[in-house]
Image: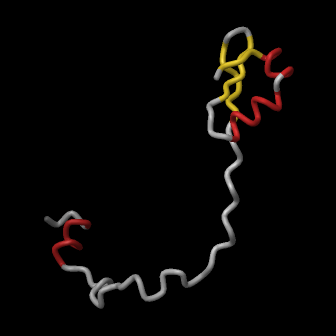
Amino acid sequence: MKVNMHEAKSNLSKLVEAAASGEEVIIARAGKPVVEMIPVRKARGPRQPGLLAGKIRINDDFYEISEDIISEFEGKC
């Protein structure tokens, strides 16, 4: 829904309800879009350390680098 500034002032409550329900609401000045009303995202709770404990595994050779890869980085190909 696209409305001009004057209409937005007169119908703010209605526009807020429309935006909150997911409808796109754009306020225009002289026919040019200026503002888009969107609902506020629900805040996420605080991060909890350890949520992925036991779900991620790193191979024992993770930090081992082959000589081929080292020589490619050093330009000795």
Depth check, front residue: 65 or 43: 43
Q: Quadrant of residue 70?
A: bottom left
Depth check, front residue: 55 or 64: 55
Q: Going 82% across and 32% down the picture, which residue do you hit?
A: 13
The tally of labels here is 0
User: Which color mode does the image show?
Assistant: secondary structure
Which residue is outermost to the top?
30
Q: Quadrant of residue 46?
A: bottom right
Q: Going 73% across and 8% down the picture, which residue do you hit?
A: 30
Q: Is residue 66 left or right of residue 59?
A: left
Image spot of residue 43 (x, y percent):
70, 60
Which residue is outermost to the left?
77
Q: Quadrant of residue 15?
A: top right
Depth check, front residue: 72 or 60: 60
Q: Is residue 50 left or right of residue 6?
A: left
Q: Going 66% across and 40% down the picture, which residue do you hit?
A: 21
Work out whether 26 lies above or below 53.
Answer: above
Work out whether 40 lies above or below 65.
Answer: above
Work out whether 40 lies above or below 6.
Answer: below
Image spot of residue 61 (x, y percent):
27, 87
Image spot of residue 75 (x, y percent):
21, 63
Q: Going 71% across and 18% down the picture, which residue do you hit?
A: 3
Q: Is residue 15 left or right of residue 23?
A: right
Image spot of residue 47 (x, y percent):
64, 74
Looking at the rendering, in which quadrant would you find the N terminus?
A: top right
Looking at the rendering, in which quadrant would you find the C terminus?
A: bottom left
